[in-house]
Amino acid sequence: MNTHELALELVQRGHVVSVLAGLSYRDMFGLGCAASALLSGQRTFFDDDLGYPVGRSRKPWLATEDVALRPDVVVVQHGEMPQIAAAFRRRGVPAVAYLHGLNFEGWALDGRPLPADALPFAGVLANSEFTAQRFRALYAITPTVLPPIFRKERYRVETCGKNVTFINPVAMKGVQRALDIAELCPDIPFSFVRAWPLPARQAFRLNARLGRLPNVVLRDRTSDMRDVYRDARIVLVPSQCDETWGRVASEAHLSGIPVVATNRGGLPEAVGPGGILIAPDAPVDAWVAAIRRLWTDAELYQQISAAALDYARRPLLDTEAQLDAMIAALQQWSAPTPGWTAHHRPRPDTRGHRTAEPPTPALTSKPPC
């Protein structure tokens, strides 16, 4: 989602943006793209349904030559990041890493950890101080911190405050803990919202457990998160992994929705004063107590809700300032091109382009001519 919103913001500024993304076979959309590419004799499927050109390939690092326009700079965000960056560098295109996860801790060359002097990046961005610190500890390079981009109108709502909302019921996001909390709060309605696909066995176990919890509703995945946040009184984020940010926390804050989250990874940065943080090793009773306090204590709820709204307005998440910082960094790390900021193409109307899944693996941004 960060790639999609970043691409749209750059397009609105007049930049020429294209995306090269990985292609998944896990759904009908991916299978359809693969079939179209195969029938056309191409290894990369192209569309512009999202408001900018997107190329999708099973192995993006082998498809860099398929990008029609030679970009001035490439922002690599996921997947085989060193391979993608190296492929573009061989074309003379500088690549910038934008770290949204900790996959860099597994980067290797010939089975050995990738040394800092072998990194094929002209510069490094990180989505949080937590991510930047982990990268610096490994490579002795300090990334520029640029939190995720949020198109605020896509999330901000007037809330009804009807339930506790848990998004993405998978193991690493803490589905077991969320189920235990819901079981111990039978008088509080919960909404579990699908996000990532679940293997059949895990889906069966989840449905079986939910069948014994009449206070929990399982909602299908949606492209309009306002439908989710409109009903939320509290957002629950019991992650069992080191989240490098915690996007749902920032989305919830835009509507003044408090967050109860695990105190680990980048979640403390995302939640700040707009919620309650629970120690990773805390018993389920600590989670239940936090949920019940926010659910029943109107004064506490209003205090944290106001703090969430104020925290959402902090300069670090100001979209215009973020874009200015990103463009300045890309200018620094790439050869200057005449017209980078001086000229703009007509801004295409991207409203209504939502027929395909937003890509996430890599973004290539070509400045305006």
Image (cartoon, rainbow, N blue to C red):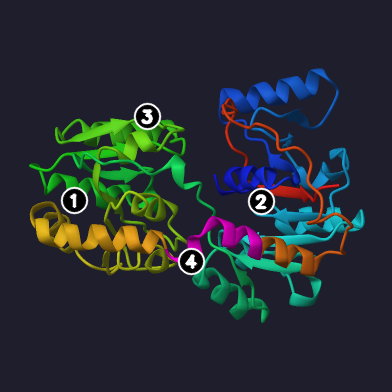
Disc 3 + disc 1, Cβ < 8 Å:
no
Please provide the residue range marked out in magenta: 314-325
| x and y, in percent, of residue 151 in the image | 51, 46
Q: Residue at x 62, y 30 (%)?
A: 25
| x and y, in percent, of residue 42 in the image | 84, 27
Q: Compute the Cα span from label 2 to label 1.
A: 34 Å
Q: Is residue 315 magenta?
A: yes
Q: Amino acid at mark 2?
A: Gly
Q: Which residue is mark 1?
A: 181
The N terminus appears in which quarter of the rendering? top right
Q: Which residue is mark 4?
A: 315
Q: Amino acid at mark 1?
A: Ile
Q: Compute the Cα span from label 2 to label 3.
A: 26 Å
Q: Amino acid at mark 4?
A: Pro
Q: Quadrant of residue 179?
A: top left
Secondary structure under tag 2 reads loop
Q: Residues within 10 Å of mark 4 (few under 14, many from 20)?
A: few
Q: Which residue is mark 2?
A: 79
Q: Which mark is residue 28?
A: none
Q: Residues within 10 Å of mark 3 (few under 14, many from 20)?
A: few
Marks 3 and 4, the one that precedes in the sequence: 3
Q: Is residue 199 above or below residue 136?
A: above
Q: Residues within 10 Å of mark 1 (few under 14, many from 20)?
A: many
Q: Compute the Cα span from label 1 to label 4.
A: 34 Å
Secondary structure under tag 3 reads loop
Q: Quadrant of residue 326?
A: bottom right
The front one of 343 and 282 is 343
Q: Compute the Cα span from label 2 to label 4.
A: 30 Å
